[in-house]
Image (cartoon, rainbow, N blue to C red):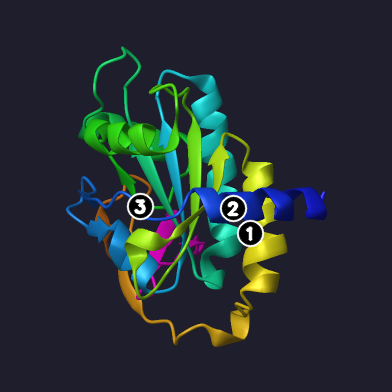
Amino acid sequence: MKSTIFALFTSLTFTLTAQVPNWTQYTCDADAYTMYSELSKGKAVLLSFSNQWNPASSQTANETEVLWQNMMGENVKVFGFLNQDQDFNNSDCDDYYSWISENNITYPTFINVEDVLTNYINKYTTSGAVNLPWLLLFFPNEENPSNSTLAYSGNSINEVNHILHDDWLQNVGISINNKQELKLVKIIDQLGRTTEFKPNTPLIYVYNDGSTKKIYVSE
């Protein structure tokens, strides 16, 4: 399996570099993120495009959250892009809050993503169409983020996990011991709203490196 995945990564390295589409997106809580900014920090970036009406998207969202919890300390950043709601309309903030609550999502997720989705479809497909869920994993070029490498395109979290462990962690040499000192930035509830510490309430702590941790203290 490792040799197969490494061969896939190697072939993608030669064919799918240069001019990675950039974007700046805002969450419904007005937090802003930019693709090139994350890549310039030396982070591997996973994009997860979903439709709320599709059960496969919900399953992938749950699996992506598990990956995010396991990899957030390894210079890996995950972003979700919620394209359509249950009625096949463009998603809005009500859909966003429902989506992150139903799937226990803590990684940053965006609505109004049609332009971003179209740009990546045009760049990384030959047919001009793609079935969601769709996962895109990029390995960074810190000095020139536009020349970062597409390491995976598909819908298998298992494949993404293998590539991150077999190529990113081992070949790039990222170590958990190199993490910056963590500082708490804010606390949010299960709906993504900023709040204060409350006992007997599920909370999410957000740290200065973009990582999050689920906290529950009973009293």
Judge whether 212 appears above or below 3 on screen: below
Judge whether 188 appears above or below 81 on screen: below
Taking 62 as reference, is 128 left or right?
left
Taking 185 as reference, is 77 left or right?
right
The numbered disc on residue 67 is 2
Query: From where the camera sits, is residue 187 visible?
Result: no
The image shows residue 53 at horizontal and vertical percentages of 41, 18
The image shows residue 148 at horizontal and vertical percentages of 43, 61
Which is more foreground, mark 1 or mark 2? 1
Q: Is residue 93 magenta?
A: no
- Residue most extreme to the top: 87
Q: Nearer the viewer, residue 64 or 93?
A: 64
Q: CA distance from mark 3 to mark 2?
A: 23 Å
Query: From where the camera sits, is residue 46 visible?
Result: yes
Taking 73 as reference, is 195 left or right?
left
Q: Secondary structure at mark 3?
A: loop
Q: Residue at x 61, y 61 (%)?
A: 70
Q: Name the amino acid type tagged 2.
A: Leu
The numbered disc on residue 20 is 3
Classed neighbour count for the residue bearing mark 1: other residues with Cα under 10 Å, few (<14), some (14–19), many (≥20): many
Check if mark 3's residue and mark 2's residue have beta carbons within 8 Å.
no
Q: Nearer the viewer, residue 198 or 5?
A: 5
Q: CA distance from mark 1 to mark 3?
A: 19 Å
Q: Which residues are magenta?
A: 199-219
The image shows residue 187 at horizontal and vertical percentages of 32, 64
Q: Is residue 216 magenta?
A: yes
Q: Earlier in the sequence, mark 3 or mark 2?
A: 3
Check if mark 1's residue and mark 2's residue have beta carbons within 8 Å.
yes
Q: Earlier in the sequence, mark 1 or mark 3?
A: 3
